[in-house]
Amino acid sequence: MPGCPPIERLYDEHAGALYALLLNFTRDEADTRDLLQDLFVKLAREPGRLTGVREERAFLLRLAHNAAVDLMRRRSSRDRTREGFAAEISPFAPADDPDEATFRRELAAALGELPAEQRVVVHLKLWEGLTFEEIAALLELPPNTAASRYRRGVDKLRGRLRPLYDEIK
């Protein structure tokens, strides 16, 4: 369809960011891969979905977030022990420096301890560099709510990671 970006370009430019967001939200690699695949299959079947979209990445991030929320709602009665494993899954690449590797492991564990609504805002702010207004639009909530979720999440991360930082420094 003319005017619509080819699915290959969309995948090349945005799949990494979408995967990171989904993994940070779902804390499960299989679910993340499934959601990402479903998202791109839908886009391939409905290429007109992106017609008129000004901010591709924001639009795709919103689609990914909504898909993850839908999945979580469908699985709300599922066994809660999965959250115990969330800290073991790291969205960060391995590091050669032992201090950095330790910090990344602890940061991944600390992120896993955040409530999902704080974790997704922290991810979008720190890793995607979105403003609170952009996050609010993407998650369909007021900008002040996005900002307060971010502050609460960062405060929790800071409190959890402060002892490690003091030890490493």
Image: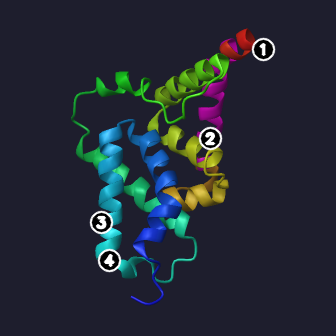
Residue 14, given in percent of the width and then of the height, sits at 50, 60
Q: Is residue 142 among what the camera can see?
A: no
Between marks 3 and 2 in the image, the one whose residue lies nearer the viewer: 3
Q: What residue type is labelled 1?
A: Lys
Instruction: Name the residue that disc number 2 marks.
Output: 150
Real-space Cα distance between discs 1 and 3? 47 Å
- Stretch of the chain drawn in magenta: 146-163
Q: What residue type is labelled 2?
A: Tyr
- Percent x, y for residue 25? 43, 42
As measured in the structure, the alpha-carbon distance from the residue carrying label 3 to the one carrying label 2 is 32 Å
Mark 1 neighbour density, 10 Å: few (under 14) some (14–19) many (20 or more): few
Helix, strand or loop at label 3? It is: helix
Instruction: Give the residue pinned by disc 4.
Output: 46
Residue named by callout 3: 41
Q: Is residue 148 magenta?
A: yes
Give me the C-alpha separation between circle 3 and circle 4.
9 Å
Q: Are marks 2 and 1 in contact (CB under 8 Å)?
A: no
- Cβ–Cβ below 8 Å for labels 3 and 4? no
Q: Quadrant of residue 166?
A: top right
In the rendered image, the residue lying farthest to the right is 169
Q: Is residue 12 magenta?
A: no
Of marks 3 and 4, which one's residue comes earlier in the chain?
A: 3
- The residues tagged by marks 4 and 1 sit, at their Cα atoms, a distance apart of 52 Å
Which numbered dot is residue 169?
A: 1
Of helix, strand and loop, which one carries label 4?
loop
Residue at figure coordinates x 59%, y 22% from the top left = 101
